Image (cartoon, rainbow, N blue to C red):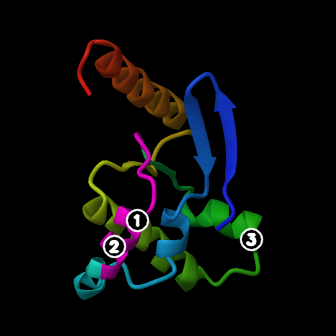
């Protein structure tokens, strides 16, 4: 698996983590969750996993060769990941600025908890 990593102090940002690969399978079938959870246990766990999802129309504009049904299935699979990985922050509605603000607030809260002797 190829992952782009950028380091800044002790914060690591990984683009396109394992979740991008899982959505191509049947995430909605709970009988498959055992194998997904096994993968997730074996891989390093991100402190704050974010999924930033565009709406189907935006994806179709950027990728006109994608089938609309394929896009809807993948978007629904991303939503199902929230059940499989409850710590995931799923950002799928609102303007991009709202998504950025929400992501920043989640990171800020996490870092404050960590600095206060929490986790």
Q: Considering only vertical position in the picture, is 102 above or below 3?
A: above
Badge 3 or badge 2: first in the primary sequence: 2
Q: Which residues are magenta?
A: 35-48
Q: Residue 11: image x %, image y %? A: 55, 29
Assess whether mark 2 and mark 1 are in contact (beta carbons under 8 angstroms).
Answer: yes
In this view, the residue farthest toward the front is 42
Q: Is residue 67 above or below residue 116?
A: below
Label 1 sits on a secondary structure element that is helix
Residue on which disc 3 sits: 63
Q: Earlier in the sequence, mark 3 or mark 1?
A: 1
User: From mark 1 to mark 2, how far is it between C-alphas?
Assistant: 6 Å
What is the number of the mark on residue 42?
1
The residue at 48%/64% (across/down) is: 19
- Badge 3 element: loop
Q: Which mark is residue 38?
A: 2
Label total for image: 3
| Residue 118 placement: quadrant | top left
């Amino acid at each position: 698996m190829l992952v782009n990593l950028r380091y800044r102090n002790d914060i690591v940002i990984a683009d396109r983590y394992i979740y991008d690969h899982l959505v191509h399978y049947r995430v909605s079938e709970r009988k498959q969750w055992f194998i997904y959870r096994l993968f997730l246990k074996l891989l390093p766990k991100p402190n704050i996993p974010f999924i930033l999802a565009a709406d189907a129309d935006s994806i179709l504009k950027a990728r006109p060769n994608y089938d609309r049904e394929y896009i809807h299935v993948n978007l629904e699979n991303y939503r199902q990941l929230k059940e499989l990985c409850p710590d995931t922050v799923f950002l799928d509605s609102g303007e991009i600025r709202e998504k950025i603000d929400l992501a920043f607030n989640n990171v800020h809260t996490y870092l404050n908890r960590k600095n206060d002797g929490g986790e």
